[in-house]
């Protein structure tokens, strides 16, 4: 429930005019992961692309690194890795294309089931992105690095793999920067639930409620877990802005600072790995499952997105001159028009729709927005503070692949900027979309309902030609094929009890 930028308020004196701007200011030109491990490698790179062994060796040894995890995230949001001893990692870095080979079906496997459109032949080369190397604060002696899937040999003159989630997000962000002169910053709120046991049924360590000090009682395992998560993120070079308890039993939230989209997605994956592993160290299980308790709040992964023109300040928008720039207005117009189509990326499981209900502060089921409104899908935060203004997108949960999430949301927004869409949806005011009458919704231009189940979400995605054009029709088609398998396997109707289904969910996500 916290904003990723609402951290500081500037004081004023009685005799001075009120200062409207507040909060920590971030800009695309000033934020960077700046990981120590990445700096250690890049500082010793040869002009030809190799590395100077002795210098690199000493730098990583100084950081205590013995093993390197080469990681990737598939369409089902499962994080995979290959673990290399540091000695072999050094050898790999001296090759012309440092990377490891991975079978091409990698993005089409759900557990042990292969989705339609994938096969058993061929391999990709997962080429290391050395700028992403970071120490694993949750696993002493380990570092992690992401990469890009590439063809071993050029196909049609190209090495890049359009299906690769990191490659696709990078391509979209590059297009917006070069063609539309726009950049983005993204911060995430990561909600999760700590469980002391999952079998035969789940049990949370406390039920203290939202932002209660009792949730951090001295000597409790919960406090130790949160403190160690904070320390581990600092070790990994990820900015932690705050943490607090949330409303459901055993529920907590960590808020991490904004980064450029690809960096933000990488950092979110690392944050989730940190949460999982630190909880495990203390004999608990952390879960990102969308909603475990019918009588309490769900668990989300809200994204805070700010929009920045690279050609100077964007002029005020025509209809909201005091709260939105033209760039922001068009971005929001794109979200309002195409948000229903990208929900398949942001809410990927059948269980995701148990959280997305009207009237429970999870975003609701209508494509609408509001100024500081907690029960709409897109909340305009800090509307009158241009330095910290951003859009909080609430229709995301932690089971979603963050690269696909941001590819979908940015694609929706860039269509608005590219096509110069007019924002025809008015803010909700004091009511939510569901709280308005049909006539009131029509007057405000709220005419699009979000999908109410995962089957509808897939259909909306497949039918949106403009989203398919930006993200890639093959990506959309194959993602939907994988998602169908995931939905069938994660909900085994008729073969397991409700408790068994919950256990399957929390032990998977």
Image (spheres, grey):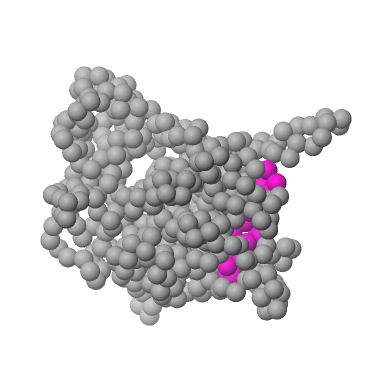
Magenta span covers which residues?
364-385
Residue 235 appears in the picture as rendered: yes
Q: Is residue 406 above or below residue 139?
A: below
User: Residue 318: where, in percent of width, then height?
Assistant: 66, 56
Whether 221 is among the magenta residues is: no
Magenta: main secondary structure: loop
Quadrant holding the C terminus: bottom left
| Residue drawn at the location 53% of the way across and 37% of the way down | 27
Image quadrant in which you'd find residue 40: top left
Q: Is residue 225 left or right of residue 72?
A: right
Whether 368 is among the magenta residues is: yes
| Residue drawn at the location 72% of the way across and 63% of the way down | 429
Query: How many numbered marks have been drawn onto this rendered protein structure?
Result: 0
Q: Is residue 508 left or right of residue 335?
A: left
Q: Nearer the viewer, residue 18 or 269?
A: 18
| Residue drawn at the location 68% of the way across and 58% of the way down | 319
Q: Nearer the viewer, residue 415 or 191?
A: 415
User: Residue 70: where, in percent of width, then height?
Assistant: 27, 42
Image quadrant in which you'd find residue 112: bottom left
Residue that extends furthest to the right in the rendered view of this protein: 15
Q: Is residue 74 above or below residue 237?
A: below
Q: Nearer the viewer, residue 159 or 54?
A: 159
| Residue drawn at the location 16% of the way across and 55% of the way down | 156
Residue 373 appears in the picture as rendered: no
Q: Is residue 127 above or below residue 412?
A: above
């Amino acid at each position: 429930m916290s904003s990723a930028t609402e951290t500081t308020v500037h004081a004023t004196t009685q005799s001075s005019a009120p200062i409207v701007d507040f909060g920590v200011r971030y800009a695309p030109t000033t934020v960077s992961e700046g990981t120590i491990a990445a700096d250690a490698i890049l500082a010793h790179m040869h002009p030809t692309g190799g590395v100077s062994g002795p210098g690199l060796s000493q730098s990583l040894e100084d950081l205590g690194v013995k093993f390197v995890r080469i990681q990737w995230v598939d369409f089902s949001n499962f994080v995979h890795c290959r673990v290399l001893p540091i000695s072999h990692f050094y050898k790999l870095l001296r090759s012309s294309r440092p990377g490891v080979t991975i079978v091409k079906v990698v993005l089409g496997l759900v557990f042990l089931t292969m989705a339609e459109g994938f096969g058993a032949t061929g391999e990709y080369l997962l080429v290391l992105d050395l700028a992403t190397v970071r120490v694993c604060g949750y696993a002493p002696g380990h570092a992690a690095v992401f990469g890009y899937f590439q063809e071993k040999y050029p196909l049609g003159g190209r090495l890049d793999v359009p299906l690769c989630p990191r490659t696709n997000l990078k391509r979209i962000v590059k297009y917006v920067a070069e063609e539309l002169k726009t950049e983005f910053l993204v911060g995430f709120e990561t909600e999760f639930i700590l469980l002391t046991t999952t079998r035969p049924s789940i049990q949370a360590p406390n039920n203290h409620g939202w932002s209660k000090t009792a949730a951090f009682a001295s000597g409790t395992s919960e406090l130790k877990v949160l403190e160690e998560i904070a320390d581990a993120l600092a070790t990994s070079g990820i900015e932690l802005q705050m943490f607090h308890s949330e409303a459901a039993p055993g529920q907590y939230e960590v808020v991490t600072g904004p980064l450029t989209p690809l960096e933000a997605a990488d950092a979110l994956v690392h944050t989730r790995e940190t949460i999982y592993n630190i909880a495990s160290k203390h004999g608990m299980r952390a879960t990102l499952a969308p909603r475990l308790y019918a009588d309490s709040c769900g668990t989300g992964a809200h994204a805070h997105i700010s929009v920045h023109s690279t050609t100077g300040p964007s002029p005020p928008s025509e209809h909201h001159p005091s709260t939105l720039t033209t760039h922001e207005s068009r971005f929001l117009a794109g979200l309002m028009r195409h948000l229903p189509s990208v929900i398949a990326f942001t809410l990927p499981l059948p269980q995701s729709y148990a959280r997305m209900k009207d009237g429970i502060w999870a975003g609701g089921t209508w494509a609408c927005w509001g100024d500081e409104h907690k029960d709409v899908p897109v909340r305009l935060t800090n509307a009158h503070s241009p330095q910290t203004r951003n859009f909080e997108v609430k229709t995301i949960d932690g089971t979603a692949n963050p690269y696909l999430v941001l590819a979908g949301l940015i694609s929706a927004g860039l269509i608005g900027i590219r096509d110069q869409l007019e924002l025809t949806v008015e803010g909700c005011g004091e009511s939510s979309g569901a709280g308005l009458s049909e006539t009131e919704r029509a007057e405000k231009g709220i005419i699009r309902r979000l999908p109410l189940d995962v089957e509808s979400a897939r259909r909306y995605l497949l039918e949106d030609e403009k989203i398919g054009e930006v993200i890639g029709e093959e990506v959309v088609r194959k993602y939907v094929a994988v998602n169908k398998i995931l939905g069938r396997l994660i909900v085994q109707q008729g073969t397991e009890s409700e408790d068994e289904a919950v256990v399957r969910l929390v032990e998977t996500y």
